[in-house]
Amino acid sequence: MSEMTSSLLPLSGVRVLDLTWHAAGPFATRLLADYGAEVIKVERPGTGDPIRQMAPFYKDEPGLERSGLFMSLNTNKKSITLNLKSEQGREMALGLVEKVDVVVENFAPRVLRGLRLDYGALSARNPGVVMTSISNFGQSGPYRDWGGSDLTLYAMGGPMLNTGHVDREPLKVAGRIPSYHVGATAASATAIALLAAEESGEGDHIDLSFFETWMGAIDRRTTNLLGYQYSGHISTRPAVGQMLGSGIWPCMDGFFFTTLVAPRFPAMARMIGAEHLVDNPNWSTPAARANPDRVDEFAALAIGWFIERTRSEIRDEVDKFGIYGGPINSIEDFVTNEHFLARQFFQEIDHPTTGPITYPGYSFRITSEVSEKTQPEGPRRRAPLLGEHTDEVLENLLDMDVDEVAKLRKEGAV
Amino acid sequence: MPSPVARDKGRKRLPLEGIRILDFTVVWAGPYATQLLAEWGAEIIRVESTKFFPSTTRGMIARTTKQMVEASGLGGGFPDRDPGARPWNRGALFNAHGRNKLSMTVDLTQPDGQEVLEELVRISDGLIENNAVATMDRVGVSWERLSKVNPGLVMVRMPAFGLSGPYKSYRTFGSHMESVVGHYSVFGYPGEDPSSSGTSLAADPAAGVGGALAFAAGLRQRRRTGKGLQIELSTAENFSTHLGEYVMDYTMNGRLHEYVGDRDSVAAPQGVYRCAGDDRWIAVTVGTEEEWSSFCEVMGRPDLPGDQRFATVEDRHANHDLLDEAITAWTRDRDPVETMNVLQAAGVRAGAVMNEQDAFADPQLADRAYWEELSHPEAGMHLHPGVVWRAERTPNRLERAAPRLGEDNEYVYRELLGFSDNRYARFEELGHIGMDYDESIP
């Protein structure tokens, strides 16, 4: 992203001190960077963010500048190395706090307190700063210092009991989806708090708990929690094929997923060649179709129709009949999909290790001015090499000179 | 007449106080965005209609009967399992996210409804919607038109596949968007086909927070430039960014992943293990050697760390099935919440797969005063999940339960739009203003 395009973006002029690592925190600051914030990522000297050492690696060879996970989570950022445990490193961090609008961190709650870099210390140096703290369970309470993983935190907070097959153990959503969601939530919280801070000049401290974020997420959890309040009902995983016309159907070249809402029943009946059901009193009303036998009878008709067609043929038919659904695609199907290619969703980003590689694109785009010239989001800058911007940032923001930085580097502070 | 969502007098301003947003959202993704914005002070006006029932928003159908609730096997959802006279006001599906929002009704298919749309846009800061593109086209919601009515409008549109491209017209729920971008190819049980994976709806909350971020960014852009803007969030594209490493492994290495269930590619053992009771489970992640020896000690299996089959993390991956059996032998007769506490006390990452009862009894959530009580005129007094994030210097709490259909018509038409008694009465007669769905709606 050139300086010119970045000045057109919503968060331009916002500077973020990024004390995050792993996935949730870096995804939060990546989103801020995507929309114009200048993000300065602070990493440990020598090894950096531990995510640099996590798969997938380019050509499967590990290395600090080879992780695709790190590369995709850290586009558009600058990297500096600071040893926050050293007195000089801490003082430099506080110096940077004075020059930023936002600090985001996702250490265990005891860590920054131990380093005397908690909100009290930061706001004493910069009362206008918005600090966002992401943690497993929040900054208080009996679980404050408990450990967690994507699996254990999703199990506690998320709709895991509703996910998977009723006869099997509950299933986690793929990979680091639980962390990404927490990161995105933190980015939205930070942006909202920033709007207030810019207006009032007073900063704030955001306390975001992974556990509470998922407990309050709308993926079934909040509906089921209120449902329990309403009726004492404890939810579980729905039986496969429980809802009429809904399910993951085998087809000629894979699987196709549909969900049938009541008003679309006649349309789906017509689509699968079962038009005779539409006016049949055993089928025509929602009450009649609530009979569990109807679910199986309908499935028997539908399956014969799906199995004779390919995903793309079915895709055209559900579009024509207005049925909600989509093919079960592989990641390859997605990356090569005509729709996302037509929208120029993917971005090719060059990196010294990999050369140009395709990345997923922006979460959202400004489209009120759609000519090429005024499109504010250009392609992203690649993720930074470890400490790539240390000299530049310390010289520009802390007025340090090259010799000073070199000396501190020798002493292990940067 | 003050806004019906009364904020305490004298309290610190909320970040979005004074921001008015027209809410055309349906189902989950859009409503979650406006829920978050409402929690932080924005005045959210849901623009609804007595003539149109968008399925899966105020219920699956408008007139759900008691018999349907029982037959569906889905249980819950309505207070005492009774949909009541106005089921659209009593469902958990809507009432879970409707808190702090207002509801007004207008029939946008009529010319005078279209006049009201423009009057509303003129006095609002933003508009958020997540409908099928054709639905918004039909009621005249477009940037080209509305930016002329209010050039400062911040408009966030969240259609499934965006406003352009070959899939623009496709109708989907969040779970189908997930299947299109590849989630169902990496989420499932090892050796099974996708039909056994069940359903993930993670794209909905993802789009909700993405939409809230988009709106906040749009507001800042308006502050900087003095001009409104349209932001487009394809909920499919937005969710696909949460699969970043799978995309990168394919584009860097050509690799496609197989189902791993609840296992991890690094930590082992990791899994979800059966506990005592019906549908009771505990999730455990053992990453470090320290965790491994603590875990074995707590299980009363000091022999395991010395066992050659489990000596290193590679060994534990290779013999994961055997380990799972040993772990289940220990968990099977235990309570999951108690086991979580025992393991966490020993420094092992563990979490009960919490059902609703566990959640409401949880000491951490109680200590942080997470649950908040709200009284709803047709559903009663109940506890709700609290605000999604806390701000230390900004008081934050829920103010009002979800609005009944058309509950705030008086406020919106009279107070905000300055309707006279005559015009208000005429709009009631024409069916724009009301608290019941038209008789033609099943």
Image (cartoon, coloured by chain):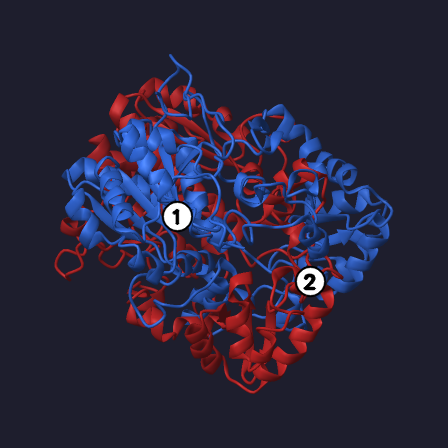
Chain colours: A red, B blue
Q: Is residue B255 above or below residue A3?
A: below
User: Which chain hosts label 2?
Assistant: B
Residue on which disc 1 sits: B210
Residue A80, given in percent of the width and then of the height, sits at: 33, 42
In this rendering, do the residues under marks 1 and 2 share a single chain? yes
Q: Quadrant of the N terminus of chain B?
A: top left
The residue nearer to you, when weighing A295 against A235, is A295
Name the kind of residue labelled 1 in the image: Gly
The residue nearer to you, when weighing A217 against B436, is B436
- Label 1 secondary element: helix
Q: Is residue A34 above or below residue A258?
A: above
Q: Is residue B283 above or below residue B424?
A: below
Name the kind of residue labelled 2 in the image: His
Residue B111, given in percent of the width and then of the height, sits at: 25, 50
Q: Quadrant of the C terminus of chain B?
A: bottom right
Residue B61 can be seen in this image: yes
**Image quadrant in which you'd find residue A382:** bottom left
Q: Which comes before the other along the chain, label 1 or label 2?
A: 1
Give me the residue at 55% from left, 68% from top.
Answer: A265
The residue nearer to you, when weighing B333 against B421, is B421
Q: Residue furthest top?
A: B10
Residue on which disc 2 sits: B317
